[in-house]
Image (cartoon, helix red, strand yellow):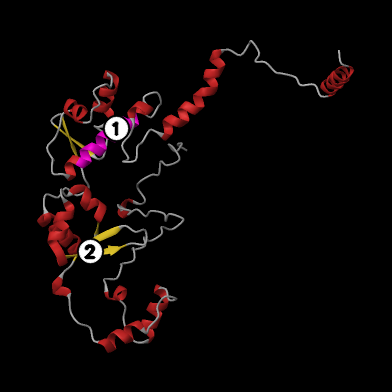
C-alpha cells in the first residue's frame, strides 16, 4: 500500500478521535402515545384559531371536541335569529326548524334538552311563545313610523337619543327606513364612535341673535362647580331653581321624658270619719 495513503489514514483517525461525534437515538420508552401528547397542543391551538371564520360564524367541527361546543351552537342560533329578524322574518320557529335552517342536525339529545330548558329559554335575546322561538330586540319596531314615535317619546320625556345599533337590531330593513325619514331625525357620534339617533323637532328650531351667541360663549364655566355658580347667582340677586321649590319640613322632635317619675297623688275622702277609722297598714293592732 502507498505510504502516503497510510499516513493520511493515520492522520484521519487522530482527527476523528480528537473530535468524537455521539449519535443520540430515541429511547425505547418513548412510545407513540407520548408523541400524541406532544401533538395535542398544536391541534388545540389550530382548532381555537379556526373556530371562527372571517364572517364571524362559528366552526362547530373545530369546537366539537372542546368545552366551547355548546357556546358555539348557541351563538350560531342567536346570530341566525337576529339576522332573519332584521330581514323581516319575525315569526317564531320551533327548535327543529331552527336546527334545520342552521344546519345543526348532528347535535345530540342532551344538547337539545339544554337548548330548550336553559340556553334559549333564559337567553335575553330570545323570546319563547307557545314553544316557538323568536328574536327579542331591545326596541321591537315594525316600520319607520314606529321608529319616529320612539324617538319623539324619548325627546318628550328627556331620555335623549337611541343607539343606532339598537335600532338596526329591532327594525327590519332599518337602513331603508332611516333613509326615508330624512331630516326628521338627526345623528350624533359619541367619542367611542357609536352613533345615536335623535328626534329632530322642527318646532324648536329658531334663530338666535349673533350678539347673544357671542355673549353666551364668552362666559367660561368649565372651572366652576355648582356651588360657585349658585354663590355667583346670589351675589347678582338671582334666585336659583333649588330655592324656589317647596322647602323640606324638619322632623318634629319628640319631647324627652324626665329621668325620675313624679309620685302619684291620690284624692282622700271621708274626712269627717278621721277619728273613727283605724289604720291597718302595718297589720292588726293589738288590744291594750
- Closer to us: 213 or 122: 213
Q: From the viewer's perspective, is 122 left or right of 12?
A: left
> Where on the picture, by quarter, is residue 65?
top left
In which quadrant of the rendered view does residue 144 lie?
Answer: bottom left
Does 140 appear in magenta? no
Q: Position of residue 139 (x, y in %)?
A: 19, 49
- The location of residue 153, given as percent across then percent down, is 16, 60
Residue placed most toward the observer, 108 or 265: 108
| Disc number for residue 74 | 1
Q: Which mark is residue 33?
A: none
**Residue 119 x, y percent position in the rendering:** 28, 31
* In magenta stretch: residue 72: yes
Residue picked out by circle 2: 158
- Among all residues in the image, which is located at the extreme front? 2
Does dot 1 land on a helix, a strand or a loop?
A: helix
Closer mark to the observer between disc 1 and disc 2 = 1
Start and end of the magenta stretch? 70-83
Examine the residues drawn in magenta and state their main secondary structure.
Answer: helix
- Locate the N terminus and report the quarter of the image it occupies: top right
Residue 286 place in picture, x, y as percent:
46, 36
Q: Is residue 231 above or below residue 258?
A: below
The front one of 89 and 49 is 49
Could you say which quadrant of the image residue 87 lies in?
Answer: top left
- Report whether 86 appears left or right of 195: left
Identity of the residue drawn at 35% across and 52% down: 274
Q: Is residue 34 above or below residue 174?
A: above
- Is the C-beta separation of discs 1 and 2 under 8 Å? no
Q: Secondary structure at mark 2?
A: loop
Residue found 21% across the figure and 27% down from its top: 99
Amino acid at each position: 500500500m502507498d505510504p502516503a495513503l497510510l499516513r493520511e489514514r493515520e492522520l484521519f483517525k487522530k482527527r476523528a478521535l480528537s473530535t468524537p461525534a455521539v449519535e443520540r437515538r430515541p429511547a425505547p420508552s418513548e412510545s407513540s402515545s407520548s408523541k400524541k401528547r406532544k401533538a395535542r397542543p398544536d391541534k388545540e391551538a389550530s382548532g381555537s384559531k379556526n373556530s371562527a371564520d372571517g364572517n364571524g360564524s362559528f366552526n362547530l367541527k373545530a369546537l366539537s371536541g372542546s368545552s366551547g361546543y355548546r357556546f358555539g351552537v348557541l351563538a350560531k342560533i342567536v346570530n341566525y335569529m337576529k339576522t332573519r329578524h332584521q330581514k323581516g322574518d319575525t315569526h317564531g320557529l320551533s327548535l327543529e326548524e331552527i336546527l334545520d335552517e342552521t344546519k345543526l342536525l348532528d347535535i345530540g339529545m342532551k344538547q337539545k334538552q339544554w337548548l330548550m330548558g336553559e340556553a334559549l329559554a333564559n337567553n335575553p335575546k330570545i323570546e319563547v311563545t307557545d314553544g316557538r322561538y323568536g328574536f327579542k330586540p331591545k326596541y321591537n319596531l315594525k316600520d319607520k313610523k314606529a321608529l319616529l314615535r320612539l324617538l319623539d317619546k324619548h325627546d318628550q320625556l328627556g331620555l335623549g337619543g337611541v343607539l343606532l345599533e339598537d335600532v338596526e337590531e329591532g327594525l327590519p330593513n332599518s337602513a331603508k327606513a332611516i333613509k326615508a325619514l330624512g331630516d326628521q331625525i338627526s345623528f350624533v357620534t359619541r367619542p367611542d364612535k357609536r352613533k345615536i339617533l335623535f328626534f329632530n323637532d322642527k318646532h324648536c328650531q329658531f334663530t338666535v341673535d349673533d350678539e347673544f351667541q357671542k355673549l353666551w360663549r364668552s362666559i367660561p364655566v368649565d372651572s366652576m362647580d355648582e356651588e360657585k355658580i349658585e354663590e355667583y347667582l346670589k351675589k347678582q340677586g338671582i334666585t336659583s331653581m333649588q330655592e324656589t321649590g317647596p322647602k323640606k319640613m324638619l322632623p318634629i322632635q319628640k319631647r324627652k321624658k324626665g329621668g325620675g317619675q313624679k309620685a302619684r297623688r291620690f284624692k282622700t275622702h271621708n274626712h269627717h270619719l278621721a277619728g273613727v277609722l283605724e289604720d291597718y297598714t302595718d297589720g292588726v293592732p293589738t288590744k291594750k
